Each structure stands twice: as C-alpha cells, then as structure tokens.
Image (spheres, rainbow, N blue to C red):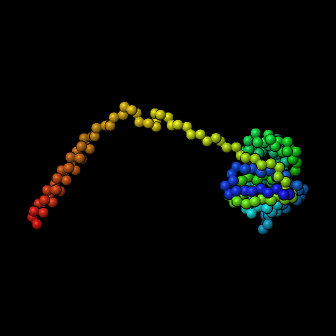
Amino acid sequence: MSDRIEISATEAGVVRVFDVDLSPQDLTDFNRRNGSWPLREALDAEMLDADHVDLIRIDDLEGVGLAGYLEDGMGVSAEDIAESRAALDRLTGTVLVVGSRAFGGTAQVLRPRAPLHLVATFTEERAPVSFDALPDESAQRPPDAKKKPPSDAAMSGRVAMIALLVLFALTAVVVWVAS
C-alpha cells in the first residue's frame, strides 16, 4: 500500500479507521506485544500507545454498528460519518480504530501496509468556543457607590501615628541639641 499519512506533533482529534484483512486466528498474533508488535509494524509507526488503539470485530458492535461506535464512542460527528457511511457499512471482519492520542504527540510518517487498508479519516466533534460578556451588575461597580467615611478606629489610628511622628521628631531634636 503506498498511502503515506503524516502525523504532526500537535495533531489532536483525528480518528482513522483501517480495515484489517486477517483471519480471526491470526488477529491474536497481530496484536500481541512481546518485543515486537506486528500491528505497530504494519502501520510503520515509530510510537504507538496501545491504550488508544482499538482492534474491533464488526460482529461485536451488533446493535450499535461501526458508525454508532465512531459517533458515540469516539466523538465523530454524524455529518462526517454520513459521507463515509457506505464504505463503513461494507466492512466485515475486523477494523482498527486509531485516535490521535495513540501517537503520543510524536511527529511521524505512517506507511500502512498489508493487512491494513485505510478506510476513512474523521475529526472528533468539538464544542464551539464562545466568549459571552459578563453580566453588567456583577462585573461593574454601581454608579451611585460612594466611598464610606473612615471609621472612628481608623481615625484614632491616624491621630496616634501623627503623635508618634511628632514625638520622634522632638526626640531627634533634643538628642541633636544635647550632642
């Protein structure tokens, strides 16, 4: 297969679906990780996190289907799935679903080869970002707000501070004259 898939270090929210052309007996060895990992080698991936790679038998998705799994389980929008629904419905046997997190932020080029065949690439649906203005009452000071007069304790503290400064100045003058 001559497909070349470039993965950037900042890629996020991309889901790729591959058809896996193997018999059920060969699938166990394909996904076994003892030293080498045939699945990673078939993708030609430098880095692949097994926690974000799903090898799924289509028959196991009974009632939900592959399209439902991608929409509900992977967050792919129904509009994206609609464009590839015919290709997804034709799939039988086993599929490989790989999300962007599987590459761990590592920039790399994938060159998938047999038994993998890229079927579709989707983007996860994201909530729109909006910046609403803060409510006026809670974000602004009321226009009639007047500054409160200082309390009696605050005034007493200020008078005491001035008295101490005067005493300090007088003491300094007496020491200066005495020397």
Is 27 situated left or right of 103 in this image? right
Question: Furthest residue to the top?
Answer: 144
| Residue 24 in view, yes or no | no
Q: Where is residue 11 in the image (x, y as percent from the top left)?
A: 69, 53
Is 59 situated left or right of 122 in this image? right
Which residue is drawn at the image coordinates 85% and 45% (left, top)?
Answer: 87
Q: Position of residue 171 (x, y in %)?
A: 14, 58
Q: Nearer the viewer, residue 12 or 56?
A: 12
Is 55 situated left or right of 168 in this image? right
Which residue is drawn at the image coordinates 76% and 45% (left, top)?
Answer: 70
Which residue is drawn at the image coordinates 88% and 48% (left, top)?
Answer: 92
| Residue 46 in view, yes or no | yes
The N terminus, quarter of image: bottom right
Quarter assignment of residue 144: top left
The C terminus, quarter of image: bottom left
Q: Nearer the viewer, residue 32 or 70?
A: 70
Question: Furthest residue to the bottom?
Answer: 35
Quarter assignment of residue 109: bottom right
Q: Is residue 18 above or below residue 62?
A: below
Q: In this view, does 96 lie above or below 142?
A: below
